[in-house]
């Protein structure tokens, strides 16, 4: 039986209380759904001096539409709740969410937890990167909004400061001329992505690509936007040849993971294949 190291426990009654604890305790870690941190603590791969439980803070739950049409996703919104929301308009979520974990994980795991935990093989960050989502980070000293692109810095490492709490995730307003998709090659036992690719395409006049967002997970040390792929698509008609040429840049300039599940050469090859498939699937939803 695996038993975590000892820790103190504090259930925050408000966001402000949680932020006060984080500001005063360098050894504190936040827990919400508990689907990621607790298993690591049981295996003693992670530890905390204090667990700050924010799981019952209603102010961090729910999905709302902003005045400009964007969607605000509360950090404590679960995968299951996201599936049953206006955000399901995005094909990338319709593809990615049903295969995350199992029923229990989808009912307990939270959007904010997935983003803040920054597992290098997590599905949701790839979708947020492709969509160009924004993340709102709050601390006792103020609030700042950062793009998802650049937030993921390494395995389980993000650009959030220790005293900051992810509050909502902001998604762009749905558009009729946008198509999105997510495809992944999963490790059969765990369901984690060996390669996962999210693609978002917006077409302009003459069916020319005016925006391309490609988020890739499972391949490198953290989820990332494949900017070289995006640049090769924008301004084109995204023909089959263009897609194949663009997808060839899926791992350009990136270190590629190699482990017992797949070596780097295989992952790199599959990243190209699945990037091509994701782009084609996103375009098919615009047909």
Image (cartoon, rainbow, N blue to C red):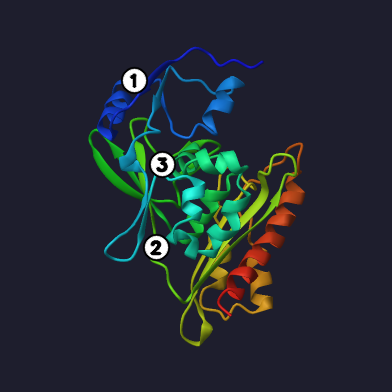
Q: Which mark is residue 172?
A: 2
Q: Nearer the viewer, mark 3 or mark 2?
A: 3
Q: Residue at x 36, y 47 (%)?
A: 168
Q: Nearer the viewer, mark 3 or mark 1?
A: 3
Q: Quadrant of residue 249?
A: bottom right
Image spot of residue 144 (x, y percent) = 29, 45
Q: Is residue 277 visible?
A: yes
| Residues at circles 3 and 2 in contact by the CB criterion of under 8 Å | no
Q: Residue at x 72, y 50 (%)?
A: 267
Q: Is residue 120 visible?
A: no
Q: Is residue 152 above or below residue 26?
A: below
Tell me the element at label 3.
Answer: loop
Q: Which mark is residue 251?
A: none
Q: Quadrant of the N terminus?
A: top right
Image spot of residue 178 (x, y percent) = 49, 72
Lateral position of residue 266 relative to residue 177, left or right:
right
Lateral position of residue 163 relative to residue 151, left or right:
left
Tell me the element at label 2.
Answer: loop
Q: Residue at x 45, y 59 (%)?
A: 87
Determine the residue located farthest toward the left in the rendered image. 141
Q: Residue at x 67, y 51 (%)?
A: 195
* Residue behind mark 3: 76
Tell me the element at label 1.
Answer: loop
What is the distance, in whole Å, between disc 2 and disc 1 at their CAs? 35 Å
Image spot of residue 257 (x, y percent) = 67, 42
Q: Nearer the viewer, mark 2 or mark 1?
A: 2
Q: Earlier in the sequence, mark 3 or mark 1?
A: 1
* Residue behind mark 1: 25
Determine the residue located farthest toward the bottom in the rendered image. 206
Residue placed most toward the observer, 183 or 267: 183
Q: Earlier in the sequence, mark 2 or mark 1?
A: 1
Q: Quadrant of the C terminus?
A: bottom right
């Amino acid at each position: 039986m695996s038993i975590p190291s000892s820790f103190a426990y504090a259930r925050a009654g408000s966001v402000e209380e949680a932020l006060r604890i984080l500001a005063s305790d360098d050894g504190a870690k936040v827990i919400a759904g508990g689907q990621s941190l607790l298993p690591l603590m049981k295996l003693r791969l992670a530890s905390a001096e204090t667990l700050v439980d924010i799981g019952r803070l209603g102010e961090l739950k729910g999905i709302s539409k902003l005045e400009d049409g964007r969607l605000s996703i509360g950090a404590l919104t679960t995968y299951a709740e996201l599936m049953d929301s206006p955000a399901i308009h995005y094909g990338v979520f319709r593809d990615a969410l049903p295969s995350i974990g199992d029923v229990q994980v989808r009912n307990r795991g939270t959007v904010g937890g997935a983003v803040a935990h920054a597992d290098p093989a997590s599905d949701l960050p790839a979708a947020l990167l492709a969509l160009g989502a924004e993340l709102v980070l709050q601390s006792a000293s103020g609030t700042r909004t950062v793009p998802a692109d650049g937030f993921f810095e390494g395995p389980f490492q993000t650009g959030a400061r220790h005293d900051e709490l992810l509050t909502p995730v902001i998604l762009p307003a749905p558009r009729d001329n946008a198509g999105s998709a997510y495809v992944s090659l999963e490790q059969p036992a765990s369901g984690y992505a060996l390669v996962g690719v999210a693609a978002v395409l917006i077409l302009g006049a003459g069916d020319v690509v005016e925006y391309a967002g490609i988020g890739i997970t499972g391949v490198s040390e953290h989820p990332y936007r494949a900017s070289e792929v995006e640049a090769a698509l924008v301004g084109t008609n995204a023909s089959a040849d263009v897609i194949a040429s663009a997808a060839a840049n899926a791992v350009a300039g990136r270190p590629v993971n190699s482990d017992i599940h797949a070596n780097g050469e295989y992952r790199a090859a599959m990243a190209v294949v699945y990037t091509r498939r994701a782009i084609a699937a996103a375009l098919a939803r615009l047909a």
